[in-house]
Image (tube, rainbow, N blue to C red):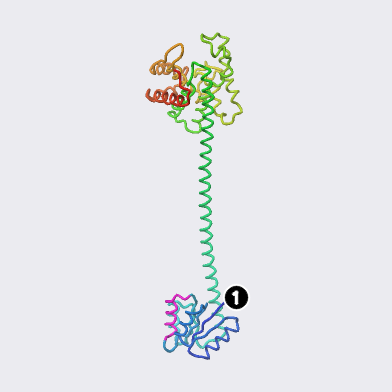
Amino acid sequence: MSTETKAPASILIVDDEETVRELLQEGLGSEGYRCKTCSNAPAALKLLERENFDLLLSDIDMPGVSGVELLQDVRAAKHDLDVIMVTGVVDTETAINAIRMGATDYVTKPFNLDEILLIVERTLEKRRLIRENLDYQRNLETRVQERTSELEKKNQEIEELFSELKVAFDEVRQSYQDILEALMAALDTRDTETQGHSLRVSEYTVTISRVMGVVEPELTHIRRGSLLHDVGKIGIPDAIMRKPGKLTEEEWVEMRKHPEIGYQMLQGIEFLEQALPIVIAHQERFDGTGYPNKLAGEQIPLGARIFAAADTLDAMTSNRPYRAALPYEVAHDEIVKYSGKQFDPQVVKAFCSISKDNWTQIQKRVYSELSARGKADKN
């Protein structure tokens, strides 16, 4: 055992025989241990109250208070040290009982110094390993607690960041929606026959979509596509857009270009990419007779198929300069009549499951929103 390991170790030797005390003190001291001696148990207990020791080496058979009683008092006082008991050859059973009461080891008399040194070294090494293990566990627990605290803090920071990002995302999304609605309000103002139409038909389309099980983010794409469906009319000349009478065939050719114009206008705008299929296909018919690409059935994007029914509902139930709004029942019957021709039968089924009151509430809500913006519907 190296001097570095022995140096801090302190040993209390308790024996009523002076020669034994001196032998042990000299032998252990020569190996680098710091040794003190006592001739009886009471003196040892007093010394233990004043000083800290790593090891107690005590005789069992002492006058007055025995070594076993000293052991009991040491354990009761919870002194942090190992105890090695020294016993006569005939008193081995007492030594074993002492082990059961908390002694670390025992040695029998007569003993030789080498045996004592080996037992002391082994006991102190075991004690060192136990202490290191306890220190490691305590340090490990501390590190785990610190790491757990750090992780909890990071999780809180991440949650706060996500919360901030969600607020920012919601604000950006609302800004997009406000911009789109302002754009379509401007278009509706230009097309005096359809003021408020884009916002209403957008809400109608989303309502049917929900009934058909469409969820986010597809709902948002459908909302944007239906809101922007007529944006291409910006590219149609005023002479055609504002013409009070019927359009000529040549003028209809120009008017039918607005889905493609709108598609081209919006290409390259990343957040509108998923809305483009509705913009270009909103005039297609389920039977393939629509325009611009004569798509049929499920070739037509779902959002555009839903939009077709919503668009017809709004067109028929809104006032126009040349006629008053038609009753909901008329629009309902018209949509049912053209199921499988102009409209997707599954869309018609979803449309029919929605009550008249729901459509009326949407109309009123849109009108209130437009009024709040100072752009009340003139219908």
Q: Answer whether residue 35 is magenta in the image.
A: no
Q: Answer whether residue 66 is magenta in the image.
A: yes
Position of 220 relative to 336 (above/below):
below
Position of 159 relative to 356 (above/below):
below
> Callout 1, which amino acid?
Thr
Label 1, secondary structure: give it.
helix
The picture places residue 297, in percent across and down from the top left corner, at 50, 21
Residue position marked by numbered label 1 in the rendering: 5
Q: Residue at x 39, y 23 (%)?
A: 360
| Quadrant occupied by the N terminus | bottom right
| Magenta segment, prevailing SS (helix, strand or loop) | helix
| Quadrant assignment, res 128 | bottom right
Position of 19 relative to 171 (above/below):
below
Give whichever of 162, 345 is nearer the camera: 162
| Quadrant assignment, res 26 | bottom right
Task: Work out whether residue 107 can be spotted.
Answer: yes
| Quadrant occupied by the C terminus | top left
The picture places residue 32, in percent across and down from the top left corner, at 60, 81
Q: Which residues are magenta?
A: 65-79
Task: Work out whether residue 299 can be spotted.
Answer: no
The picture places residue 119, in percent across and down from the top left corner, at 54, 80
| Quadrant assignment, res 326 | top left
The picture places residue 309, in percent across and down from the top left corner, at 46, 21
Q: As drawn, is 236 to the left or to the right of 373?
A: right
Q: Residue at x 53, y 67 (%)?
A: 135
Q: Residue at x 42, y 82 (%)?
A: 69
